Amino acid sequence: MTMVTSPTRRPVPEVLRDIIGNLQDLVRSELLLAKTELKEQAADAAKVAVTYGTGLMSGFYGVGLLLLAAVYGLTMIMAAWLAALLLGAVLTLVALALMSSGKKQWKRLNPGRSKTIQRLEESLQWSKPQIK
């Protein structure tokens, strides 16, 4: 025959220490997760910024060099100012298209509050009444 033992009661200070320790672990874990998410978002933002900047710089160099070469060639059939105007307009449109693409990618990043930060705030709100 087995004896049924009554559950042991833990002292209140010990229970409170366990609760506080668990809350501290929860907060540490949530902060670590938030830090990791922010690093990932920063890496994504850097990639988009490089794309945008590359498009911008390519546009500037392209406009300058192609206009120079095209103007030299087109001065044989039209006035130099007309050749420069025509080619400048075309290459500027190409640069604007690249910049527009980078801007759209930038908007898709969603740098708002992460889910981890929201969960951390919810955990803190939940824990306040539990500790009192």
Image (tube, rainbow, N blue to C red):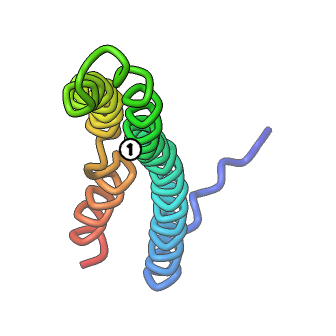
**Residue 67 in the image, given as x and y percentages of width and height:** 38, 33
Residue drawn at x 26%, y 18% is: 78
Q: Is residue 103 above or below residue 38?
A: above
**Residue 59 in the image, given as x and y percentages of width and height:** 39, 37
Quarter that holds the C terminus: bottom left
* Residue lying at the far front of the rendered structure: 76
Question: Is residue 46 something that shows in the picture?
Answer: yes
Which residue is at the front of the view, 29 or 126?
Answer: 29
Which residue is at the front of the view, 20 or 24?
Answer: 24
- Image position of 116 (left or right of 118): right
Which residue is at the front of the view, 32 or 41?
Answer: 41
Residue drawn at x 46%, y 57% is: 34
Q: Quadrant of residue 130?
A: bottom left
Q: The residue under label 1 is which amino acid type?
A: Phe
Mark 1 secondary-structure assignment: helix
Q: Is residue 117 above or below residue 98?
A: below
**In this figure, which residue is indicated by the disc labeled 1?**
60
**Residue 27 in the image, given as x and y percentages of width and height:** 45, 67
- Image position of 52 (left or right of 43): left
Question: Is residue 44 something that shows in the picture?
Answer: no
* Residue lying at the far bottom of the rendered structure: 13
Residue drawn at x 21%, y 69% is: 129
Q: Is residue 114 above or below residue 107?
A: below
Q: Is residue 50 above or below residue 80?
A: below
Residue drawn at x 20%, y 26% is: 82
- Image position of 19 (left or right of 106): right
